[in-house]
């Protein structure tokens, strides 16, 4: 009996170890998958692009907002939205041209390297996905930090969340247009039109956001849909560019 109970205990311990190994393997696989996506993003984007888009431009937007907020006047708040926010969204929309460029256009420059290897498409798809996901994160951190003084002055936190969602929708959604364009002049002109919904929507939620509480989850759902649709669109164009002549 003792030997039987001992073998049962050993079997249970062995099963626990097997379960633990399985969990560890899945965790390591997930970590390796995430690291692979990040590595491909770093390969496809140069260091200057990442520093300017993820650090320099957000820092300038935050620093300027903090300076303007010191005046504590309504005209300063309007200045933040119209001037600083306008500049930030212009950079957010236009900066993609200097990395991924007109990748959706047939026979676009810079896309020929996809035909030189078997894994080129997968690497590029991973980089595009990370770039899309980084945008809402970057916008959220920037706007949230820049809005700290205004939250202290009484601006509703849900209104800030709405602004983040609207800005992210415009930033990600604009990729479906601007990645077909290869002339910088037209990109800058069109960007002035594209960012108008972001500015108008931000002003609207600052005024009515606290009253329309349900708009926040609606915008979050819309953002998820825009991200999914944009990524699918990019994947289709990337795979077609692989076989274009």
Image: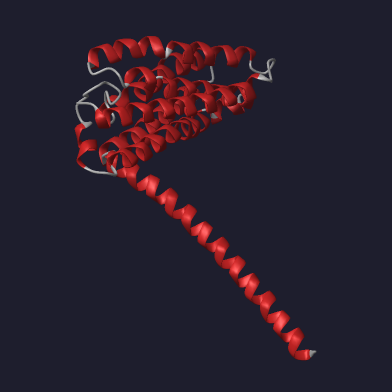
Q: Residue at 36% of width from left, 19% of height from top?
A: 90
Q: In this orientation, which residue lies closer to the viewer: 2 or 80?
A: 2
For the N terminus, the quadrant is: bottom right
Q: Residue at 72% of width from left, 80% of height from top?
A: 8
Farthest residue, direction bottom: 2
Relative to 30, residue 202 above or below: above
Q: Residue at 45% of width from left, 25% of height from top?
A: 65
Left or right: 124 as drawn, with respect to 32: left
Q: In this orientation, which residue lies closer to the viewer: 176 or 235?
A: 235
Left or right: 147 as drawn, with respect to 84: right
Image coordinates for residue 5, horizontal then vertical, percent:
76, 84
Q: In this orientation, which residue lies closer to the viewer: 223 or 164?
A: 223
Image coordinates for residue 173, horizontal then vertical, percent:
44, 21
Q: Residue at 40% of width from left, 31% of height from top?
A: 58
- Specify the quadrant of the image occupied by residue 207: top right
Image coordinates for residue 97, horizontal then vertical, percent:
28, 25
Farthest residue, direction right: 1
For the C terminus, the quadrant is: top left
Is residue 141 visible in this depiction of the protein?
Answer: yes
Image coordinates for residue 3, horizontal then vertical, percent:
74, 90
Q: How many marks?
A: 0
Relative to 245, residue 207 above or below: above
Relative to 214, residue 2 above or below: below
Relative to 100, residue 196 above or below: above
Left or right: 235 as drawn, with respect to 199: left
């Amino acid at each position: 009996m003792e030997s039987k109970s001992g073998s049962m205990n050993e079997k249970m311990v062995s099963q626990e170890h097997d379960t633990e190994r399985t969990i560890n393997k899945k965790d390591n696989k997930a970590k390796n998958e995430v690291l692979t996506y990040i590595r491909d993003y770093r390969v496809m984007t140069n260091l200057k692009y990442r520093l300017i888009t993820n650090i320099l431009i957000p820092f300038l937007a935050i620093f300027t907002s903090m300076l303007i907020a010191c005046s504590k006047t309504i005209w300063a708040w309007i200045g933040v939205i119209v001037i600083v926010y306008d500049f930030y969204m212009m950079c957010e929309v236009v900066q993609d041209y200097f990395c991924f460029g007109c990748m959706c256009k047939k026979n676009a420059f810079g896309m020929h390297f996809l035909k030189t290897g078997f894994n080129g498409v997968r690497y590029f798809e991973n980089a595009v996905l990370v770039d899309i996901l980084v945008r809402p994160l970057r916008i959220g951190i920037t706007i949230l930090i820049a809005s700290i003084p205004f939250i202290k002055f009484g601006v509703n936190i849900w209104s800030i969340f709405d602004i983040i969602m609207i800005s992210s929708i415009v930033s990600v959604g604009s990729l479906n247009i601007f990645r077909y364009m290869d002339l910088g002049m037209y990109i800058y002109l069109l960007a002035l039109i594209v960012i108008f919904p972001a500015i108008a929507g931000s002003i609207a939620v600052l005024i009515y956001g606290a009253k329309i509480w349900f708009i926040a989850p609606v915008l979050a759902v819309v953002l998820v849909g825009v991200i999914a649709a944009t990524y699918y669109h990019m994947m289709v164009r990337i795979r077609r560019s692989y076989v274009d002549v």
